[in-house]
Amino acid sequence: MTEQTQAIDLRNKKILVTGGSGFLGTQVVDELKRRGVSSDSILVPRSSDCDLRVWENCQRIVKGVDVIIHLAAKVGGIGFNLEHPGELFYDNLIMGALMMEAARQASVKKFVAVGTICAYPKFSPIPFKEDDLWNGYPEETNAPYGLAKKMLLVQAQSYRQQYGFNAVFLLPVNLYGPGDMFDPKQSHVIPALIKKFTEAVRDNKKMVDVWGTGIATREFLFVRDAARAIVLAAEKYNKSDPVNIGSGMEVSIKDLVQKIAGIAGFVGEIRWDASKPDGQPRRQLDVSRAQKEFGFSAEMDFNAGLKETIEWYLSHRS
């Protein structure tokens, strides 16, 4: 496979950020601006007027673009994944495949495909290494989403091999931070718990129900750290191998719940609903490749990140 080694100066490039108005996307756009990219050089298509499942839309928005950071995705927590597996598979697969093909046809210089930790096998050895990515089937509740995003890796590698197309694939862990999605129908674990516990405090509730057993573990990455990693990869990483983007930490859901309850000021009873799924048993990434290849390591302290996220939610709750 063709590997390109030269770093890209993003400051004089036209950059398309799909999903650029979303939770992660707004932070990526801000990070690009911090690195000297002008607002006029950053294109952010809105899903309301540019459905990326339509080929003609993808063709239209890639014209004249130098770099694409593909963040657009349909996402949600365990409940959303259980209710919408077909949509999550189809929408994410089609958006990714069409965008990369349109980019290739338009001779875009660099395509950064952002995948998901859900692509890993259910029982990957801890910490998850990129070389283990194909050693089993993903956790069932989010497999359709994880596999759809994983196909971006296959597409990137095959396009590099056949066409010399510079596409890279990143695997971010669960993200959290200000601006997250707090709608309980679609939110991931941290915003869902923040909403539950802050509302319990507001309403003087004595008990909060939480899904699962609390035994499962997760790794979390603050959204500004994730944005910095993605922009670093856009600048410096030009290889076919997938790269984990994470903090390298591991926390049990039980400990996470206690941290959020404590910061929120909840002092009542926490009741675990073991009839609800835990999801993947453990998640923690080997993050050494990102450090080696483009100098990324997470900076935000987890407790400080949770505090900032809760404060943001409380100030925007209305």
Image (tube, rainbow, N blue to C red):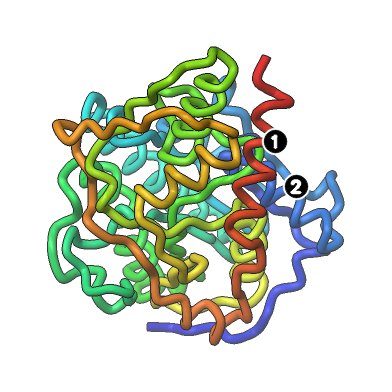
Other-residue count near label 1 (Cα within 10 Å), few / some / many at <14 / 14–19 / ≥20: some
Residue 165 visible at all:
no
Q: Position of residue 11 (x, y in %)?
A: 82, 64
Q: Secondary structure at mark 2?
A: strand
From the viewer's side, name the closer residue of 8 and 55: 8
Where 74 sits versus 149, above or below?
Answer: above
Q: Secondary structure at mark 1?
A: helix
Q: Quadrant of residue 126?
A: bottom left
Kind of residue at disc 2: Ile
Instruction: Give the label on residue 42, or none.
Output: 2
Q: Quadrant of residue 153?
A: bottom left
Residue 239 visible at all:
yes
Q: Earlier in the sequence, mark 1 or mark 2?
A: 2
Q: Is residue 26 left or right of residue 173?
A: right
Instruction: Give the label on residue 177, or none.
Output: none
Q: Position of residue 227 (x, y in %)?
A: 64, 56
Where 188 sits versus 243, above or below?
Answer: above
The residue pinned by badge 1 equals: 311
Q: Looking at the image, which residue is at 31% across and 72% down? A: 128
Q: Quadrant of residue 84?
A: top left
Q: Looking at the image, which residue is at 23% across and 43% down? A: 213
